[in-house]
Image (spheres, rainbow, N blue to C red):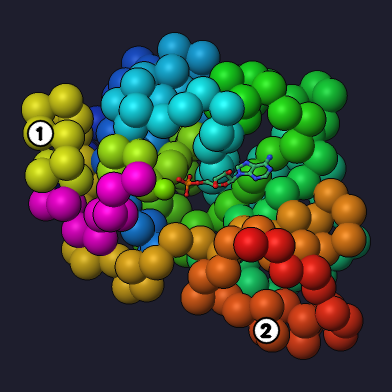
Amino acid sequence: IYKPNLINLKKAKKNIENNNVIGVPTETVYGLAGNAYSNKSVTKIFKLKKRPTFNPLIIHFKNLRDLNNDAILNKTFKRLYKVLCPGPITFILKKKSKSKISEIAIARKKTIAVRIPKHKVARNLLKILKVPLAAPSANISSKLSPTCANDVVDEFGSKIKFILDGSQCQIGLESTIIDLTGKPTLLRPGSITAEKIQKILKKKIAINK
Ligand code: AMP
Ligand code: MG
């Protein structure tokens, strides 16, 4: 477990560049993060988590400009982005054909789940990286999600060599997921509620559970 100072953030960057998988805090839960452009890196994530290969990962970006390289940003997205980002919400968007995101990371879909996290440590890491991070929760599939660095150690032991410490996660609940590829549809509830989204969009959204 490493303090998130500049030296250690640079070590984290090196790990990501070498396609290693590391533990990273976000405001929701701790993530198991790897280079989203690298098949090698994201394959490690699926293996570590024992996650079925058909279940796509959420891709984390530092800002809108980077996001624009890989996803098509529609009007509804831009409206929600203005109010809710950075924050604990994930958007399903259409993937750009020129996107460099690993096909394995997104389970060969034409859509991609994207998030711009708010946690200082996640942001500071993304800021010094040239690539987005594929980062699902740092737990074995179907187990409880980790909300502190020690939870990640308990789950993976020596299989994860590097974890950035971001203290206790503020929210401790997975991000809200909303599909914006068609009529806005809530796919997973979270701390940002359907009501809040409806207020911003000034219309009803569908709820799919
Ligand atoms: P996790 O990373 O473990 O928090 O889980 C990510 C969730 O996002 C999973 O339930 C996925 O099914 C969902 N997800 C990721 N990508 C997509 C996508 N392109 N379309 C719909 N759901 C997605
Ligand atoms: Mg999860």
Describe the element under mark 1 as helix, strand or loop. Answer: helix
Measuring from the top left, give residue 129's x and y in whole percent.
47, 34
**Residue 193 at what x, y percent from top left?**
61, 79
Query: Does mark 2 have its CB less than 8 Å from ligand 1?
Result: no
- Residue 181 pos. (x, y %): 84, 49
Which amino acid, mark 1? Answer: Gly
Nearer to the camera, 118 or 29: 29
Q: Tell whether 110 sits left or right of 137.
A: right
Q: Residues within 10 Å of mark 1 (few under 14, many from 20)?
A: few
Q: Quadrant of the C terminus?
A: bottom right
Q: Which mark is residue 59?
A: none
Q: Which residues are magenta?
A: 142-151
Give the SS element for disc 2: helix
Name the residue: 49% across, 36% down: 133
Residue 157 disc label: 1
- The residue identified by callout 2 is 196
Query: In the rendered view, would you say 197 is above or below 78?
Result: below
Write down the quadrant of residue 9 in the picture: top left
Q: Quadrant of the N terminus?
A: top left
Q: CA distance from mark 1 to mark 2?
A: 39 Å
Q: Residue at x 77, y 63 (%)?
A: 185
In magenta segment, residue 147: yes
Q: Amino acid at mark 2?
A: Lys
Quadrant of the image occupied by residue 203: bottom right
Residue positioned 59% across, 62% down in the render: 188
Q: Which residue: 17% across, 35% down? A: 156
Is 76 a magenta residue?
no
In front here: 167 or 108? Answer: 108
